[in-house]
């Protein structure tokens, strides 16, 4: 009986130690998060008006949408904006590639166990690393005057949904959101209309929060028209 009691006390002591270590680890994580915010704010606040380009990291340079992203990015710089991407390969690389040498080219990279690395077209000094997705998303929304959303996977959908939700709920001011590739986005748009709208889960006006286009010219024209009307101003 004494040995059993000693064993129970030992197990309880180990559980308490693990619990205490978890609390300490979580508490210190607050400072790591704060550090990422401070570093991001200090670097991003100086860049001026920019448009973010999102899309798959898996598309190669011979892909149709990769080439279009290069074209869109260059045209964005021609109307006075810098370009922000996730800093990695695929569409992100294409966005930075199109902006490089023409305007500011910013990369907000995220540490991942696979596929993510800085592409060579990000401007020196604007290649910013993040450990936390939520901090990185704050930087995208806070310092972008528009989103160009190319074909992509879960990460691209996450970034699109974040922007739509914040605008829909009036947590941020409205800015232009462009979905490039009507064929690619058709299934999602059909679901928006046939399910979300039909079930009353979104309003008809929510479908006006974005524009679907098929050319680089139309993508940039939508952003330009928005700011010709409302004037370019920072959103923070």
Image (cartoon, grey):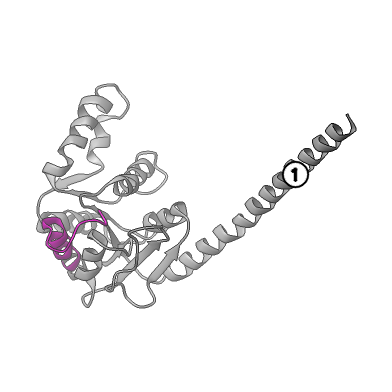
Q: Give the x, y percent position of residue 180.
A: 16, 50
- Residue furthest out toward the right: 2
Residue depicted at x 42% and y 44%: 171
**Whether residue 152 is situated above or below residue 92 in the rendered picture:** above
What quarter of the picture does the C terminus occupy? bottom left
Numbered disc 1: secondary structure? helix
Residue depicted at x 23% and y 64%: 95
Q: Is residue 138 left or right of residue 99?
A: right
**Rendered image quadrant of residue 49:** bottom left
Mark 1 Cα-neighbour bin, 10 Å: few <14, some 14–19, many ≥20: few
Pick the residue in front: 113 or 143.
113
Pick the residue in front: 84 or 174.
84
Residue carrying label 1: 14
**Whether residue 112 is situated above or below residue 77 in the rendered picture:** above
Q: Is residue 220 left or right of residue 124?
A: left
What quarter of the picture does the N terminus occupy? top right
Which residues make up the magenta segment? Answer: 54-74
Residue depicted at x 10% and y 57%: 64
Residue depicted at x 43% and y 66%: 129
Residue 72 in the magenta stretch? The answer is yes
- Residue furthest out toward the top: 199
Q: Give the x, y percent position of residue 24.
A: 69, 53
**Rendered image quadrant of residue 5:** top right
Q: Is residue 59 left or right of residue 235?
A: left
Residue 159 in the magenta stretch? The answer is no
**Rendered image quadrant of residue 105:** bottom left
């Amino acid at each position: 009986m004494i040995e059993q009691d000693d064993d129970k006390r030992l197990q309880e002591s180990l559980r308490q130690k693990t619990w205490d270590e978890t609390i300490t680890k979580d508490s210190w994580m607050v400072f790591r998060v704060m550090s990422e915010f401070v570093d991001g704010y200090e670097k991003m606040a100086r860049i001026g008006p920019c448009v973010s380009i999102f899309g798959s990291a898996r598309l190669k340079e011979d892909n149709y949408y990769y080439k279009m992203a290069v074209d869109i990015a260059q045209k964005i710089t021609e109307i006075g904006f810098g370009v922000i991407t996730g800093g990695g390969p695929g569409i992100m690389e294409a966005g930075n590639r199109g902006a490089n040498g023409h305007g500011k080219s910013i990369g907000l990279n995220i540490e991942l166990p696979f596929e993510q690395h800085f592409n060579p077209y990000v401007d020196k000094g604007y290649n910013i690393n993040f450990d936390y997705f939520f901090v990185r998303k704050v930087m995208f929304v806070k310092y972008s005057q528009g989103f160009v959303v190319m074909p992509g996977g879960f990460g691209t959908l996450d970034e699109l949904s974040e922007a739509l939700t914040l605008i829909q709920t009036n947590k941020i001011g409205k800015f232009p959101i462009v979905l490039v590739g009507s064929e690619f986005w058709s299934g999602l748009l059909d679901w928006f209309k046939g399910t979300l709208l039909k079930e009353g889960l979104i309003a008809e006006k929510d479908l006006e929060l974005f524009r679907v286009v098929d050319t680089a010219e139309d993508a940039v024209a939508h952003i330009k028209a928005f700011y010709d009307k409302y004037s370019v101003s920072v959103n923070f």
